[in-house]
Amino acid sequence: MNETHVLKAWGLILRGYQPVLSVEITNRCPLSCPGCYAYQPNHVGGTALERIAEYTGQDLVAGILGLVARRRPLLVFLVGGEPLVRYRELSILLPQLCSKGVYVEVVTSAVRAIPVEWCQLQKLKIVVSIDGLQPEHDVRRKPATYERILANIEGRRIVVHCTVTGQMARRPGYVEEFIDFWSRRPEVYSIRMSLFTPQVGEVREEVLSPEDRRRVVGELDRLRENYDKIRLTTKMLDAYLKPPASPDHCIFSKVTGCVSSDLKSIVLPCQFGGTPDCSQCGCVATMGLDALGRVTLARLRLASIFAASFRIGSLVSRVRQALSWTSSPLETLPGDSVPTESD
Ligand code: SF4
Ligand code: SF4
C-alpha cells in the first residue's frame, strides 16, 4: 500500500464507503480444514456458509460487478468456500474488475490449476493458503496437498499465506523451515504469516497460548532479516502482540465490507464472522492496518484520524441514504449490525 492508496481510501471513508470488499463467492469447498471459520455454525447471521444461497454463471459475474459498482472498493478479496470452484466465472470477472482499476486478491487452496492467463492481470494477486509443512498440511488440507499445489502453481506468480497454528508454534524451527521452503520456490514472490484466530471461548489445539504467540513473533522478527519475501514491519510485529481490543478498534473490520455467497448477507464483525476473539486475532491484513494506525502524523495517531473519518463517513452515508441520492452503497456502517443489504 502506498501514499496514493491511503489517500484514496481516506477519501472513500469520508464519503461513507468502505475501501475494501471481501466476497465469499461460493458456499462450496472440497476441503474440510480443522478450525475453518467459514463453516462455523454461526458464521453469518447465526448460519453456516453452506446454508447461505449462492450464485453461479452470469448471475454471479453480474452480481459481483453490481456490488463493486455500488460499493466502489479499491481492493476486492474473493474468498470462499473455495473460489476456484467458480474458476469459469472468475475468468470472465477478473479481467473486468482489473480493467476498472480495482485491485483483486483471489484467496485459494490451489486445489485445481490456476488459469495461466490470470497471471497477465497486473492488478490481481493470487494468494495460496498453505498451512504448514507437507506432512501436517496434507493432513489438514487434503485434497489440496503439497503435490497438487506445486503442480497447480507451476509457472504462475503467487503469494503464500500461512496461518500459524498452536501445533506449528510449539515445534522449534517449524516456522523457519516453512519460510525457507517457500522462499526458495520461484513462483512465490511474497509470504504472509497470520496466526490462528479463534472464536471467543474456542478451545482447540490450533489456538496459540500467549507464550506461543510471543515465541512466533520473536522468530518472525529474526527471520525477516534473512528472508526478504516476508515483509513485516516492527509496528506489525507489535500489533500481533497487542491486537485490536474489539471490532470497534479494528481498522481492518471498519474499512472492509464482507459479503457472503448470496451477495447480500453481511459477515460481521469481520471476515471471520461469528464471534471472533479480537484479543487473539492474528490476521496479517488486520495487523498491517493496525500498524498503519500506529503511525503518528502531527502528533496524532492515524488511528485517531481514521476514527474521526469513519464517524464523518457514517454520517454522510446516512444522509445520502435518507435522501436516496444513490442506491445505498454502504449498508453496513462501522458500528452497525445491519444483517443484509437493502437492495
Ligand atoms: S479451504 Fe478455506 S473455506 Fe475451505 S475448508 Fe479450508 S479454510 Fe475453510
Ligand atoms: S477478530 Fe481480528 S479482524 Fe476481526 S474484528 Fe477482531 S481484530 Fe478485527
Image: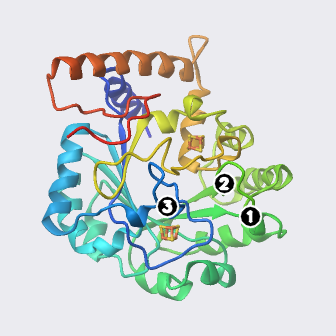
Q: Residue at x 71, y 53 (%)?
A: 225
Q: CA distance from mark 3 to mark 1?
A: 16 Å
User: Does label 2 or label 3 sit earlier along the sequence?
Assistant: 3
Above or below 229: residue 144: below
Q: What residue is shown at x 54% (from left), y 84% (from top)? A: 142
- Quadrant hosting residue 80: bottom left
Q: Position of residue 153 (x, y in %)?
A: 42, 78
In the rendered structure, which amino acid carries the disc numbered 3? Ala
Crowding around mark 1 (Cα neighbors within 10 Å: few <14, some 14 to 19, many 20+) is few
Residue depicted at x 78% and y 63% = 169
Disc 2 from disc 3: Cα separation: 12 Å
- Residue holding disc 1: 204
| Amino acid under disc 1 | Arg
The residue wearing badge 2 is 198
| Residue 298 x, y percent position in the rendering | 56, 11
Q: Is mark 3 within 8 Å of ligand 1?
A: yes
Relative to 216, say whether 232 is above or below: above
Q: Amino acid at mark 2?
A: Pro
Colour pattern of the rendering: rainbow
Q: Are marks 2 and 1 in contact (CB under 8 Å)?
A: yes
Q: Residue at x 36, y 26 (%)?
A: 13
